[in-house]
Image (cartoon, rainbow, N blue to C red):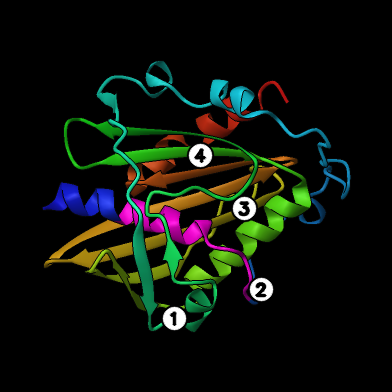
Amino acid sequence: MRVRIAATVLGITAALLALPACSTAAEHQTSPAARPGKPVGTTQKPAALSSAALKSRLLDQSDLGSGYLPKPQRPAQHHDVTVIGCPALSELGGNAATGGTLAFPHKAKADFTYGGSSSEISEELYSDSAKKLSDGVDRIFDAMTGCPTYQVVAGGTPVDVASQELSAPRALGDEQWSQLLTFTAGGQSTVVKQTAIRDGSLLLIVSGSPALVDRHLDKALSKATSAS
């Protein structure tokens, strides 16, 4: 049951992130002006990276170490998604494809399981103008963390969600967002950490088991931006 929940909640999270952005703004960890030596305006990287270029910058098994296996890709499933108890998320729209991705033109994604257990880690890379990346992620994270508890019904399956905004690592990138999501269904709970880092025209999102996200976030950003 736990493995199934983990797969479901990661898909629901991605689906919510894929909804159109139109929410009120809240605080998040912003950047260039807050950190000496990184003047505002100097981190804008004008050229968007292609999806092929992004794919080459994803972590692979050799980067992650032993015990990690690529997660088999499953056919995309399209379900009606209803959000209950969180008006900000409801306003974004109720229908989304579970397992979806953010609506930016250039993207790449990799999913891994760890140690033959239900522990998972997912890495997503996107590229667009800095403003589009910032506005899109900012609004979605604000909506998701703006409601301490709510319920998501996807394909007839109700999932209770508790959200908590976390302090993101301010030393990484130009903007940072982080949240902890607890999903409960069928008496089983799964905790998912999700951290997003924008560095110029590149956006990195790492999601999954909190310990795995913390372990690989720096490495993922380093590889993603090493050729920038």
| Residue bearing the label numbered 3 | 176
Residue 112 magenta = no
Badge number at residue 21? none
Q: Nearer the viewer, residue 47 or 65?
A: 47
Is residue 175 shown to the viewer in this render?
A: yes
N-term mark: 3 or 2? 2
| Residue bearing the label numbered 4 | 124
Q: Is residue 99 above or below residue 89?
A: above
Which numbered mark, 3 or 2, is in the foreground of this view? 2
Q: Secondary structure at mark 4?
A: strand
Q: Quote the CA–CA distance across marks 2 and 1.
A: 15 Å
**Magenta span of residues:** 9-23
Q: Secondary structure at mark 2?
A: loop
- Residue at the location (30% across, 40% down)? 120
The amino acid type found where label 4 is placed reads Glu
Is residue 29 shown to the viewer in this render?
A: no
Q: Secondary structure at mark 3?
A: strand
Q: Quote the CA–CA distance across marks 3 and 2.
A: 14 Å
| Residue bearing the label numbered 2 | 25
- Residue at the location (61% across, 40% down)? 126
Question: What is the quadrant of residue 161 in the picture?
Answer: bottom left
N-term mark: 3 or 4? 4
Q: Quote the CA–CA distance across marks 1 and 3.
A: 23 Å
Q: Quote the CA–CA distance across marks 1 and 4.
A: 26 Å
User: Mark 2: few, some, or many residues within 10 Å (few <14, many ≥20)?
Assistant: some
| Residue bearing the label numbered 1 | 86
